[in-house]
Amino acid sequence: MRARPGLLVQWLTILVLSAAVGFGVNAVRPDGLPLARAAQSSVKLSQAGGGEIGIKDAALLFISGRAVFLDARSQFEFEQGHIQGAVNLPPREFAAQYQDLKPLLAGKEAVITYCDGENCPLGHSLAKHLRDAGLKNVFVLKDGWGLWQAEKLPVAKGRAQPPKAANKGGQCFDCGS
């Protein structure tokens, strides 16, 4: 079956116009997808750190991979649902778990603690422990779990995988490579 040249031209014209409209809409949307590579997040972090961070800034840091999220709630609550990729670190377990998590925290621009509810003190308590341990880039996402869900941002359930860290020989603990 032979295609008519006029039909092929129409098909290509529709395809090109559709792509142009799609790229144009993506370019003007404030939440458009990066097409080549993600630009640096527009979130500016103070060197001193500290204080609270808003949900929009936390989400941008999450998407750009510039932050690690620490869930200050109990392990049971964490397993019921948490921010995707978050690590569970209740303040009462800080002393026992901090040394194992230290390599994970060192490579990020921000460490964001959170719990659930406007009046939940656990995020602030964990942030204080982290600052007392010498971290400067610690922020609290007040009512973090509730806000994160309300914004329909990525979540996970169940136990978190332990963070992958290299041992002193440079090998991965999980696979030995």
Image (cartoon, rainbow, N blue to C red):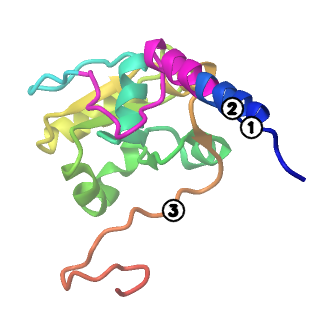
Q: Which residue type does callout 2 highlight?
A: Val
Quadrant of image for the C terminus = bottom left
Near-viewer residue (45 or 14) = 14
Image quadrant in which you'd find residue 163: bottom left
Q: Earlier in the sequence, mark 2 or mark 3?
A: 2
The answer, for residue 117, to whether it is visible in the render is no
Q: Which residue is mark 3?
A: 161
The residue positioned 53% from the left and 43% from the top of the image is: 84
In contact (CB < 8 Å): disc 3 and disc 1: no
In contact (CB < 8 Å): disc 2 and disc 1: yes
- The residues bearing labels 2 and 3 have C-alpha atoms spaced at a distance of 53 Å
Q: Which residue is mark 2?
A: 9
Q: Which residue type does callout 3 highlight?
A: Gln
- The residues bearing labels 2 and 1 have C-alpha atoms spaced at a distance of 6 Å
97 displayed left or right of 107: right
Question: Depth-wise, is mark 3 or mark 1 nearer the camera?
Answer: 1
Image quadrant in which you'd find residue 65: top left
Q: Which residue is mark 1?
A: 5
